[in-house]
Amino acid sequence: VIKNLAVVGVGLIGGSFAMALRAAKGIAVQHITGIGRSEANLLAAKRLGIIDEYARDLAAVEDADLIMVAVPMGAYGQLFSALELHARADAIITDAGSTKQYAIQMAEQFLTAPGRFVPAHPIAGAEHSGAQAARENLFEDRLVLMTPTAYTESDLVLQVSNLWQLVGARVVTMDAAQHDRFLANVSHLPHLAAFALVNAVAKESEENPFDFSAGGFRDFTRIASSSPVMWRDIALTNREALLMSIDGMQGELTNLRRAVAQGDSEKLLHHFTQAKLARDGWLARREREVTGG
Amino acid sequence: VIKNLAVVGVGLIGGSFAMALRAAKGIAVQHITGIGRSEANLLAAKRLGIIDEYARDLAAVEDADLIMVAVPMGAYGQLFSALELHARADAIITDAGSTKQYAIQMAEQFLTAPGRFVPAHPIAGAEHSGAQAARENLFEDRLVLMTPTAYTESDLVLQVSNLWQLVGARVVTMDAAQHDRFLANVSHLPHLAAFALVNAVAKESEENPFDFSAGGFRDFTRIASSSPVMWRDIALTNREALLMSIDGMQGELTNLRRAVAQGDSEKLLHHFTQAKLARDGWLARREREVTGG
């Protein structure tokens, strides 16, 4: 039983978490308070039945047993400082942020008991945002990466992990630094590359690139339609890992550029074949795992 | 009436072209000869009813009224030299290649009458290839870019353009250099960037990146599963334009890297917002055009 759940940031992730917990068997959520900055969004969340009441002031977390933080990373400092003031001493605080070392750092900086903060990251992004985009099955069969520290209270880790499993997610525990490194490569770098590509193309031409491309350009740049604020915050709070990732991609692009400039047929074929084999291999491995084959 | 159609390269594009022409109203194709290197693929094409007969020797184009060239760009030199030997003097030669200046250059180099070559590029790629992937509606509502030169015989341009329209495509005529520049940005560069990203990620980690990413990585890298040979040839035959595109993207990445390194919040937000506005704008414009709104 969760008597009082507080969701800070009732967007796609926070809203879906509330809906999923409410719908899950084996758990009873009695009351859900949504806290956020946009009254219009909170009102929409209430009308949609995602939350029971809402507030724009963080003092509204005062009765919560469980506090879910689902806001852009840039808000974490102010937010944790307010949670220190208003949260119950026995409340569990967890989050859904994309960069975990920074989240942990903010908890350490602002909370008297940072061991009550359980860092987690559900891998279920989308370009859509806001309460309207939330849905109760968003986390079904999705991965949730949990990155507890040495001092995170282990019974709380277990409780949060159980909640994620109740809403259908698979939970994997890993080191926060390892998490940030992986995500820099498979999520943060692709987003930056998509933004960079779109800007490069936009600078050059008045024409609509969608007129001159098949699905490739649309898919490749889809993530460039994501929230600029969210991605600014991710870039700023995963700086070291992201710089490494950018350097890795720039290195590969430089090699490819040289091969193109020199007309090095063999090298190009080798690069492209390696990439295709790697991707096809991952995909096949993933499908075998998912189908249990 | 097309008495004899020869399709050189019975893959996704060549095979679909044959199927679409056969199915189109207002035209009668009497006989289709498929020519290629892989007997297994040609046999599959025959069994699927895509072609009536096949040959592995280009001498089989000798009766054709219309010759569709749908092979990787790297084969153009040898191919046009064989067409000069074997094609009827009154045959129309057209193609579906991705880089048009190179195609035109090969026609000029090897054909006595390069004005009979009608360069065209249907924008209908996919990662799948081979005759098995062909389908008769592949070109419906797709764009075909035609890039005739000053000396291309205009009645042949009209005939090829009519064929594409009969199979449901929209035809746009443009300069070959302009075509190659556009495609470098919206197709060739994204493919190279996807190959580069996959290689960068593969170098670093034994883990399966699909385990740690939502749809973003999968979509972003989808085109890295494309044919390495086809993309090697495209890179080599659109060298100048592609180098410009790579430089544009590397410049943008370098700017983003600097903003990340300096923690320049405003600059990052500006970059990301510009990209999102550009992409969302293109998409909206495209949808208005397609729906005729």
Image (spheres, coloured by chain):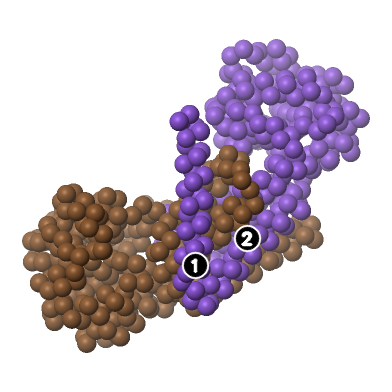
Chain colours: A purple, B brown
Visible in this render: residue A196? yes
**x, y percent for residue B194:** 53, 57
Question: Which numbered marker is on residue A103?
Answer: none
Residue at 28 percent across and 66 percent down: it is B70
**x, y percent for residue A266:** 47, 69
In the picture of the structure, the residue carrying the numbered disc 2 is: A249
What SS does tag 1 mark? Answer: helix
Look at the numbered discs 2 and 1 and tell me whether their residues touch, using CB distance below 8 Å.
Answer: no
Q: Observer-nearest residue: B278 or B160?
A: B160
A61 lies above or below A98: above
Q: Quadrant of residue A29?
A: top right
**x, y percent for residue B58:** 19, 71
Question: Which numbered marker is on residue A268?
Answer: 1
**Three-letter amino acid code at the position of disc 1:** Leu
Give the crowd class for mark 2: few <14, some 14-19, many >=20 residues within 10 Å: many
Are the residues under marks 2 and 1 on the same chain?
yes
Visible in this render: residue A208? no
Q: Observer-nearest residue: B112 or B74?
A: B74
Chain ID at mark 1: A
